[in-house]
């Protein structure tokens, strides 16, 4: 099937836009729940499991799984203790976690800048 003149012009006009080389996303932080955990900890020195659960409005299992992945990556540390008979888990963002968040935010800012044509 022959292309119309308009379709040919649109096809010819589309050239890839050169962008600066932007490193790959940090897949650990890029997932929305993990990004929310890291972001919440970036503005709070420590947060308990229940505080994170309330802030993120998510399930116990979701917090546990994503916090474990962040801990395995070295992005957060946790301290377990008891208040009476109740377990208490406190999370803190590590220096590596803060650096990873800053790198992620810089990456996003670079993408936004390219998308806006700046």
Image: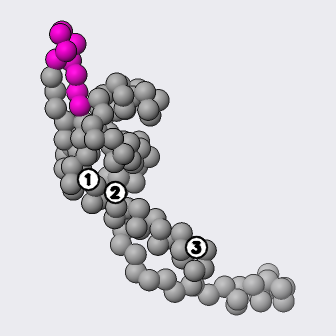
Mark 1: secondary structure: helix
Which circle's residue, 3 or 1, is located before the other in the chain?
A: 1
Residue 87: percent from the left, percent from the top? 21, 18
Q: Nearer the viewer, residue 21 or 85?
A: 85
- Marks 3 and 1 sit apart, C-alpha to C-alpha, by 27 Å
Q: Is residue 71 left or right of residue 116?
A: left
Residue 7 visible from this viewpoint: yes
Q: Nearer the viewer, residue 30 or 90?
A: 90
Mark 3: secondary structure: helix
Q: Main secondary structure of the magenta part?
A: strand
Q: Nearer the viewer, residue 59 or 108?
A: 108
- Marks 2 and 1 sit apart, C-alpha to C-alpha, by 6 Å
Q: From this viewpoint, which residue is outermost toward the top?
A: 85
Q: What residue is disc 1 on?
A: 97
Disc 2 + disc 1, Cβ < 8 Å: yes
Mark 2: secondary structure: helix
Q: What residue is disc 3 on?
A: 115
Would you call the spot at circle 2 few (<14 residues within 10 Å), some (14-19), or many (20 or more)?
A: many
Q: Is residue 2 above or below residue 50?
A: below
Give the extent of the magenta segment: 82-90
């Amino acid at each position: 099937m022959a292309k119309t003149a308009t379709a040919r012009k649109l096809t010819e006009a589309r050239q890839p836009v050169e962008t600066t080389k932007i490193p790959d996303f940090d897949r650990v932080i890029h997932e929305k729940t993990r990004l929310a955990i890291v972001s919440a900890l970036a503005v709070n020195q420590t947060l308990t499991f229940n505080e994170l659960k309330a802030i993120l409005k998510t399930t116990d299992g979701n917090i546990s799984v994503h916090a474990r992945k962040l801990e395995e990556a070295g992005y957060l540390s946790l301290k377990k203790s008891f208040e009476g008979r109740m377990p208490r888990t406190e999370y803190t963002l590590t220096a590596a976690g803060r650096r990873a968040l800053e790198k992620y935010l810089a990456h996003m800012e670079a993408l936004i800048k390219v998308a806006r044509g700046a």
